[in-house]
Image: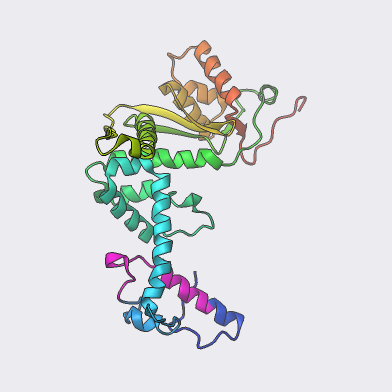
Amino acid sequence: MKAPPKHAPPRIASTGDLRAFQRLMTLALVRPLGPDDGLAARWIDGRLTADVAAEFVRPNDRLNPVERLEIYSRSYWYRLLNCMRDDCPALLALLGEKRFDRLSRAYLARHPSTSFTLRNLCSRLEGFIGSRPGLAAPHAALAREVARFEWAQTIAFDGEARPRFEPADIARTPPGRLRLGLQPYLTILEFRHPVDDFVHAVGRRNALRSEASNAVDSAGPGGARVRRVARPRRGLTFVAVHRHQDRLYNKRLDPPAFRILAALRDGRTLTQAVAAAGKRVTAAQVQEWFTAWMALGWFCRRAGAAIRKSGN
């Protein structure tokens, strides 16, 4: 966004004046909140925010200009923070309320929303945790994996679906030349923890918590408490996160199956991908995996690639 003007236009007399005012107003609303979730005391150039706000916001009989702006700034920030909670329930469960809130605010200050859709809000969260591990300590490594898995779920929910490869399409090209693309909504992941189990356990816990909340009147103050989800122990895990018939799924992968899919994802030919599985893998195993993957529609034409026509 173009830098805002130092002062608000005295009146909106042109489209340029309107744009300048919009930039100024936007900055006032999206700047990170200060102590007690109020506007920062100082403007970006060091002036008092109260003096800047008085140039384009009138007071009323109850609120001064800063207080009026704070209403909208808090609404904006609370909306983003709530979206992060909705998109990252497992990360919230792992870190707890206070650490998750600190992480979210620091992340949004570094990576503010720049998209017309809040769908992309957490797209950089895994990388941010890697750059600021102290915000997720002492579970930064696990937090990165949880953030990666939850972002993969977002991709699977509404990621692009390309025309799928059918067996007849594959038969037209020799395996040594055939390169299969993976559907954009499919993400294959390698973890040092069974993150998928943890995420699903949090989902079940949250569902129980919701049911308990709805039944609070009948349960009374002595009602059963929903237990905290235990952190997963280390264990190498391979997972595919995808959708099928408009529903989200994740599928555990054997290590050789993961290596095949990773090779295809990276542009290897079918022959090279199968070789990446290792010598201990049998032809029957490979056939079983590909049969399942084809049924799920995981393969598509790679961007810019053409299907080989028979007889050419």
Q: Position of residue 216 (x, y in %)?
A: 33, 39
Relative vertical location of residue 278 with respect to residue 162 in this rendering, above or below: above
Residue under the point 37% across and 80% down? 64
Is residue 260 something that shows in the picture? yes
Q: Does the magenta portion include 21?
A: yes
Give the residues drawn in magenta, as a range. Answer: 20-41
195 vs 264, left or right, is left
**Percent of width and height locating residue 192:** 32, 31
Is 103 colored magenta in this rendering? no
Question: Is the C terminus in the top left, top right, bottom left or bottom right quadrant?
Answer: top right
Q: Decide: is 37 above or below 162.
A: below
- Frontmost residue, 77 versus 43: 77
Against 281, is 122 above or below? below
Q: Quadrant of residue 47?
A: bottom left
Q: How many marks?
A: 0
User: What is the x, y in percent for residue 262?
Assistant: 47, 31
Residue 3 visible here = no
Q: How is the image coloured?
A: rainbow
Q: Position of residue 60 (x, y in %)?
A: 42, 81
- Main SS of residues in magenta: helix
Q: Quadrant of residue 110?
A: bottom left
Q: Residue at x 38, y 58 (%)?
A: 108
